[in-house]
Amino acid sequence: MSGHGNGKVILLGEHAVVYGVPAIAAGLSSGATAVARAANATAAPTLSIAPWSVSVRPGDGSALGTAFEALVRARRELDPQRATDRSVEATMTLPGSAGLGSSAALGVAVLRALDHADDIARDFAQSQQIALAWERVFHGNPSGIDTALALAGGLARFHRQPAAGQPALVSIEGAPITLVVAHSGASGSTKETVANVAALRASQPEAFAEALAAFGALVHTAERALREGALESLGEAFDEGQTLLRAWGVSTPELDAMCEVARGAGALGAKLTGGGGGGCMIALVRDEHDAERVRSALSVRGREAFETTIGAAHTARKEKT
Ligand code: PMV
């Protein structure tokens, strides 16, 4: 009766992906796990999140309650015969508002727990449709990259508007890479940074279009580098991505400083990941030895980090703190 949703790191293309540029992301094995229970016949079902000591009901006015309601409604619309109302208990193994896709991971875990309890097997497109109903409550205009990775994991290129007949998510196969992921100590609101980028687009449409084209070229370079195992080239793409994101105002002085620290300790490239405005940065390292150097340089700055190895498509990923 349980379901899991992966967290994720965006390697390149966050924010630009909202406007139709492809982005590259990898699922994390940490995320959210949920269990569905039979609902109390006399009360509305609840969604409880253990580590946050939160319990909500559909339509109780909270964002989580609204998202739970949207997900329950979307399931019922698609499967009026089989979808039942149940209470769900979830556990998170990711920090929220960190750019690691915690809300999408939670939505997917809840969906899978409910589907499992009702014995419903869904394809990716339908799961993505329901998970997006949940995610819209938190992010306003989500591209769908977080929910796609929460569902599929692996290392992939995501396209919000793929060409006709093409999938939204395409696996990228290559040699494993190692990333150090570090939290800046401040939480970031993806809804706010996405709205700020939309305002920038409205006020400077030409410069914005140029930046989108630059992101598109970088994502292309990064994908080739991943397939060929060209780590230096991937690291340069990370650094250029960070420069573009800073110009869009979604980085913070602390994230910039952490990227510098990581580079100074031997990282091949570093950038913020996800929505920004706080949250996490990722640094690409050559091996475990360099990962350790980067982690200890960041810890001198008071920043906690973990290391994740992203394998070839859908193969083992390991995370260690
Ligand atoms: O902050 P996160 O983990 O929710 O990632 C958001 C990614 C964005 O590209 C900024 C927004 C989106 O919907 O794609």
Image (cartoon, grey):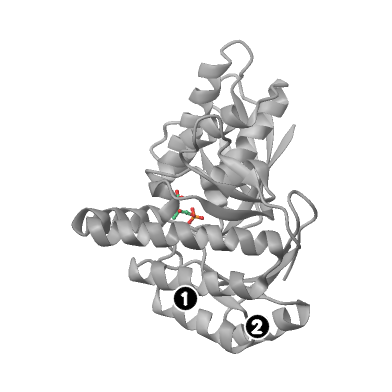
The label shown at residue 134 is none
The residue closer to the viewer here, 160 or 49, is 160
Q: In the drawing, does residue 170 fall left or right of residue 177?
A: left
Above or below residue 195? Residue 293 is: below
Total numbered labels: 2
- Alpha carbons under labels 2 and 1: distance apart: 14 Å
Q: Residue at x 61, y 39 (%)?
A: 108
Q: Check disc 2 and give the amino acid type.
A: Val
In the displayed structure, does residue 54 sit left or right of residue 142?
Answer: right
Q: State which quadrant residue 169 falls in.
A: top right
The response on whether ligand 1 sits within 8 Å of label 2 is no
Is residue 27 shown left or right of residue 140?
Answer: right
The amino acid at mark 1 is: Leu
Residue furthest left in the image: 203
Q: Secondary structure at mark 2?
A: helix
Residue 106 visible in the current orientation: no
Can residue 254 be spotted in the picture? yes
Label 2 Cα crowd, 10 Å radius (few <14 / some 14-19 / many 20+): many
Q: Nearer the viewer, residue 208 or 70?
A: 208
The C terminus - image quarter: bottom right
Task: Name the spot of residue 26 as percent of width and height, x first.
Answer: 64, 55
In the rendered image, the quadrant that contains the N terminus is: top right
Q: Position of residue 309 (x, y in %)?
A: 73, 65
Q: Residue beneath label 2, please?
A: 294
Q: Which residue sits at x=71%, y=66%?
A: 229
Q: Nearer the viewer, residue 34 or 184?
A: 184
Q: Is residue 201 left or right of residue 51?
A: left
* Element at label 1: helix
Residue to which mark 1 is pinned: 255
- Residue 158: x %, y % from top left: 55, 46
